[in-house]
Amino acid sequence: MLTERERAILDFERSWWTVDGVKDAMITERLGIEGTQYYRILADLLERPEALDYDPLVVRRLRRLRDRRRRDRVTQVATGSDT
């Protein structure tokens, strides 16, 4: 079961980009936590079935982005490219 804070993080991630402002500042203002803690909790949430049940679109989108970044890093290391 997700906590209220965990649901709030998923809700925020769904819509933060629709509001003008710096994301880290909005995280602190709206959720009362620092960006590093937010991203740590969010990364953990992406692995939890409860989060997928709560908001499948957001969780799947974030998983795809995470996986794409991982593949890009592996490709950069393999090719010796730093772009």
Image: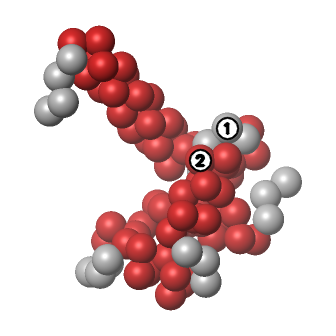
Q: Which three-letter amino acid code belongs to the residue tagged 1?
A: Glu
Identify which residue, 30 or 70, lies in the foreground: 70
Judge from the rendering whether residue 11 lies leftward or rightward of residue 47; answer left or right.
left
Identify which residue, 71 or 11, lies in the foreground: 71
Dot 1 lies on which element?
loop
Looking at the picture, does residue 56 appear above or below residue 73?
Answer: below
Residue at (33% x, 27% y) in the render: 73
Identify which residue, 63 or 57, lies in the foreground: 63
Identify which residue, 24 or 52, lies in the foreground: 24
Tally of numbered discs: 2
Residue 36 appears anywhere in the view: yes
In the rendered image, residue 21, in percent from the top left (x then y), is placed at 29, 81
In the rendered image, residue 30, in percent from the top left (x then y), is placed at 54, 84
Residue 57 appears anywhere in the view: no
Looking at the picture, does residue 29 appear above or below residue 62?
Answer: below
Local packing at callout 2 (Cα closer than 10 Å; few below 14, some 14-19, many 20+) is: some
Callout 1–callout 2 Cβ contact below 8 Å: yes
Dot 2 lies on which element?
helix
Residue with the most extreme right position? 1
Looking at the picture, does residue 35 appear above or below residue 55?
Answer: below
Residue at (27% x, 80% y) in the render: 20
Splitting the image into 4 quarters, where does residue 41 fall? bottom right
The disc at residue 43 is 2
Q: Which three-letter amino acid code belongs to the residue tagged 2?
A: Ala
Judge from the rendering whether residue 82 lies leftward or rightward of residue 36; answer left or right.
left
In the rendered image, residue 7, in percent from the top left (x then y), is placed at 67, 64
Mark 1 to mark 2: distance in Å?
A: 7 Å
Pointer 1: what residue?
A: 47
Splitting the image into 4 quarters, where does residue 79 fall? top left
Judge from the rendering whether residue 82 lies leftward or rightward of residue 75; answer left or right.
left
Residue with the most extreme top position? 78
Residue at (61% x, 65% y) in the render: 37
